[in-house]
Amino acid sequence: MTQQTVASFFRPAVDAVPNYKPGKQPAVAPGMTAYKLSSNEHYLPPLPAVVKALTKPMTPSSYPDPAASALTAELAMYLGVGSEHITVGAGGSEMLSALAHVTLEAGCEVVYPSPSFELYEQVTALTGAVQRPIPLTPDYRHDLPAMAEAITDHTRLVLLCSPNNPTGPAITAHEFESFMAAVPPNVLVALDEAYWEFMTNPDAVNGLDMVNNYPNLVLIRTFSKAHGLAGFRIGYAVGQPEIISAIGKAQIPFGVTQPSQNAAIASLHHIDQVLERARAIAVARDKFVTALRAQGWQVPEAQANFVWLPLGELSTEFENACVAQALAVRNLGHGVRISIGEPAAMQRILEVTAKFITRHSTICTKP
Ligand SMILES: *Cc1c(COP(=O)(O)O)cnc(C)c1O
């Protein structure tokens, strides 16, 4: 069978879609504990209450609650919005995918930052829409004026990521409001806040403060990062009921299993512990950034549970140096993203970075 025959099944857009590349597992090195710092996962064990929730009796032969009503009600209480403003799905990823499907098609346009979360390119490419990736500023922030400028009569969707994965900076409330003032009401803005719990910059935008002010704003959040439930696949969107209802049409029914719903509810019941752990990770992150800068590294503002090293063409050499020390990091070709893990992992990374910068001082310390 030739390539051509196979390709003919598919919409032309499919050819343009990149495959998602997940973070690698660490290499095994004898006598060394391996650490995975490549997927921004939580490194602590689950909360005891979450473990307990998983022992609840369940009925594997029955579908889960399709509306995740109990979890939605908990979220509504926690967020201080009505249930009709929330939809729950299989991770923030499902929210992004559903949003792309209900807004985009061939002939229209989507604006998003670049580099940012790889899934933006994938889910929007699949719709056949024209993609307008807007380069970040030299300090690795969203170039919001350029993004506003890129909006045309054909634009339906803008994706924002705060803090930005993989580079780290958060959008400020002031930047966000100026941007929204320039966005026409018929363009939907999705603010992806997958890492909002780790933010410590007091100027950073909190989508919840904004969502009632803009009928064309939708927030995307997840239990994968600060809640440490990546393996359970739970995320949600917050916005006006019309947006929520439209997203629901593009979601897979029964996408969140009952054990996942139970785990998320238990986690929300212990939100104080979740946020305390997030703050501890933010403290470790700031310490790590300070240590890197003391070594001479140029590190952008880090507001999530990871740090970005803009290594350019040295990215693979750096990744290999980490692999040799049983550390998995995320090499994105133009830089390397390192998730905050246990103290021993961060210590070992700092040994790698110290050696690496002595070998490449002129390149890594460029302003
Ligand atoms: C991890 C992540 C998500 C959501 O991931 P899920 O596991 O699907 O909830 C969304 N956006 C960004 C930027 C992320 O890094």
Image (spheres, rainbow, N blue to C red):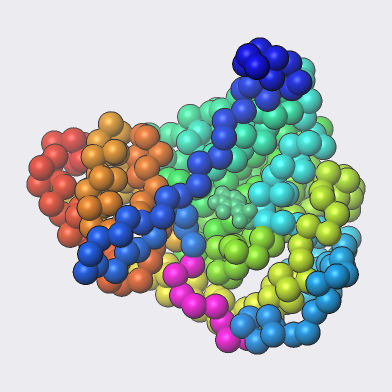
Q: Main secondary structure of the magenta part?
A: loop
Q: Residue at the spot x=74%, y=28% of the render?
A: 127
- The residue positioned farthest toward the left in the image shown: 358
Q: Nearer the viewer, residue 149 or 27?
A: 27
Which quarter of the picture shows residue 20? top right
Image coordinates for residue 361, horizontal then vertical, percent: 13, 41
Is residue 342 rendered magenta in the image? no
Q: Would you say 133 lies left or right of 36 here?
A: right
Q: Quadrant of the C terminus?
A: top left
Q: Position of residue 308 (x, y in %)?
A: 36, 48
On screen, residue 236 above or below 154: below
The magenta stretch spans which residues? 42-49
| Quadrant of res 156 | top right
Residue 81 visible, this orientation:
yes
Q: Position of residue 25 (x, y in %)?
A: 41, 55
Q: Residue at x 88, y 46 (%)?
A: 249
